[in-house]
Structure formats: structure tokens, C-alpha cells
């Protein structure tokens, strides 16, 4: 039990599909993050939310759309993705911006 | 900008061998340094950290010392076990004000395989 739960664990979608990734944290943390993990590349920070407010968008294409309805839940809405978007998408949370991150197990996304 | 460079893997060791995974960094100011570990099929977990020069982080038999003069934070373990097989990530967080001050900068990761 990591305290950060991501669903689904695996997702295969076509380029015209619309899907959503879900993240839930049970740690009482105030900050939540989306990272992209691709082979042979460093982890890429995509979005940051602090107290439900988006504070960072690292030049992520608009086909990725985050949503944070409350401090415990974070979504990543996906539409018209490209094959190069195939990766492991990791959610993380932290007590505050300077605290260590707690990661979920990730969603393995394959775009066909 | 900030960057982290790790030794390229994969690294394959026999059980009870000595492990070193090199990590060097470039950063503004005096960063905090971290090692994260990712076991197969899981997310990253914080393994250890150091927040200032000459600090030694340690956990589960792993150690790393913050060396400001060489801008390094090498990970070591005296006797590895099969259960240590995982991917290890070095990371830093620069301590400066501004919109990006909370961001972690990660290395590419080093895969370790320990064989019986």
C-alpha cells in the first residue's frame, strides 16, 4: 500500500480515443503531481497542483488536460494522443512543495 | 539549468558484492540531493536524502555522501542482495526562490540486477 493509488494500471488506446487517468492519495498531502516516465529519459514533470490550484505546466501539449477537484484526487484527461505519448505516467503527492514525493505505481499507457 | 548525470547501466552484480552508482550534478546554489528506487512494476520510493554539504544519507544499508567540492552524491552499499534489484534514480532540488523551486530534477536512472 503506497498511499497513492493510480488507476488503471494499464491502458491501451487509439489515437482518436478519449480516456482519463485517475490518482488518489490517502496521505493528507496538499500537493499533487503528474510525471511522464519514458525509456532512456529522465522523469518529466508535467503538472503540479498545490491546494487544488495548478501551479506548473511544463509546456505540456494540450492533448493532456489535468483536473484536480480536491486535494485528494487528480485526473489526467487524454485525447487525440500520438504514439510517442506511450509511457508510464506517474502520480505523486507531497505534504507541501518542499517535502519528499510519494509516488503511485503508475499507469502504463500504450497509444496505437 | 539544473541537471543530474548518473552512470549508465545496466549494472549486474553477484549477491554480496559491493555496489557503487555514480551521480554528479549541476545546480544553482546549494541543492538538496536524493536517491529514489523503483522496484519492478512500482512507482518511485525515496531511498535517502542529504540537504547540505558533507551530510550522509543512509537507509536499508545504502549510503550516499553530499560532496560539494566534486558535486557528487554517489550511492553505495557494502553487500547487495537479490531483493535490491531495481532502478535507482539520483535527483536534486535547488534551494532558490521562484516558480520552479519545488521541482525535482532526475537523472535517467541506473538499472541494477543482482544475481544469486
Image: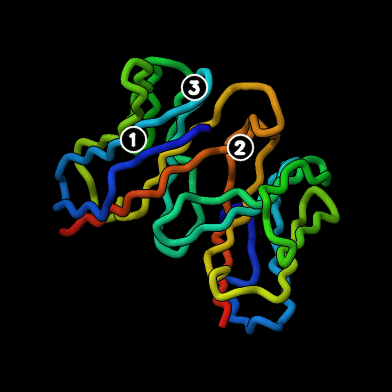
**Residues at circles 1 and 3 in contact by the CB criterion of under 8 Å:** no
Tell which subunit mark 2 falls on: B
Where is residue A75? Give x, y as percent. Answer: 75, 61
Of helix, strand and loop, which one carries label 2?
loop
Residue carrying label 1? B23
Q: Name the one closer to the observer, B110 or B83.
A: B110
Instruction: Answer left or right for B109 relative to B15.
Output: right
Q: CA distance from mark 1 to mark 3?
A: 15 Å
Q: CA distance from mark 2 to mark 3?
A: 15 Å
Of helix, strand and loop, which one carries label 3?
loop
**Residues at circles 2 and 3 in contact by the CB criterion of under 8 Å:** no
Q: Name the one closer to the observer, A52 or B41.
A: A52
Tell which subunit mark 1 falls on: B
Mark toward the start of the polypeptide (1 vs 2): 1
Give the quarter of the figure containing the C terminus of chain B.
Answer: bottom left
Do dots 1 and 3 share one subunit? Answer: yes
Where is residue B24? Give x, y as percent. Answer: 35, 32
Instruction: Answer left or right for B18 relative to A109.
Output: left
Residue carrying label 2? B103
Where is residue B59? Give x, y as percent. Answer: 38, 34
Closer to us: mark 2 or mark 3?
2
B51 vs B14: above or below: above
**Crowding near pointer 1: few (<14 within 10 Å), some, many (20+)?**
many
Which quarter of the figure has residue A11? bottom right
Amino acid at each position: 500500500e503506497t498511499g497513492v493509488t493510480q488507476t488503471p494500471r494499464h491502458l491501451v488506446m487509439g489515437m482518436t480515443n478519449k480516456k482519463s487517468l485517475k490518482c488518489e492519495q490517502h496521505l493528507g498531502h496538499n500537493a499533487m503531481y503528474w510525471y511522464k516516465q519514458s525509456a532512456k529519459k529522465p522523469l518529466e514533470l508535467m503538472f503540479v497542483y498545490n491546494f487544488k490550484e495548478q501551479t506548473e505546466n511544463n509546456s505540456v501539449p494540450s492533448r493532456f488536460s489535468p483536473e484536480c477537484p480536491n486535494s485528494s484526487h487528480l485526473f489526467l484527461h487524454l485525447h487525440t494522443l500520438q504514439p510517442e505519448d506511450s509511457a508510464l505516467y506517474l502520480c505523486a503527492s507531497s505534504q507541501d512543495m518542499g517535502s519528499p514525493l510519494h509516488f503511485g505505481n503508475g499507469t502504463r499507457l500504450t497509444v496505437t | 539549468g539544473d541537471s543530474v548525470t548518473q552512470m549508465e547501466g545496466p549494472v549486474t552484480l553477484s549477491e554480496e558484492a559491493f555496489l557503487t552508482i555514480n551521480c554528479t550534478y549541476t545546480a544553482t546554489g546549494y541543492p538538496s540531493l536524493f536517491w529514489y528506487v523503483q522496484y519492478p512494476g512500482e512507482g518511485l520510493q525515496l531511498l535517502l536524502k542529504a540537504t547540505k554539504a558533507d551530510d550522509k544519507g543512509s537507509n536499508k544499508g545504502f549510503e550516499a555522501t553530499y560532496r560539494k567540492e566534486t558535486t557528487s552524491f554517489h550511492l553505495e552499499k557494502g553487500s547487495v542482495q537479490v531483493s535490491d534489484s531495481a532502478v535507482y534514480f539520483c535527483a536534486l532540488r535547488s534551494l532558490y526562490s521562484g516558480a520552479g523551486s519545488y521541482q525535482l530534477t532526475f537523472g535517467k536512472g541506473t538499472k541494477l540486477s543482482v544475481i544469486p
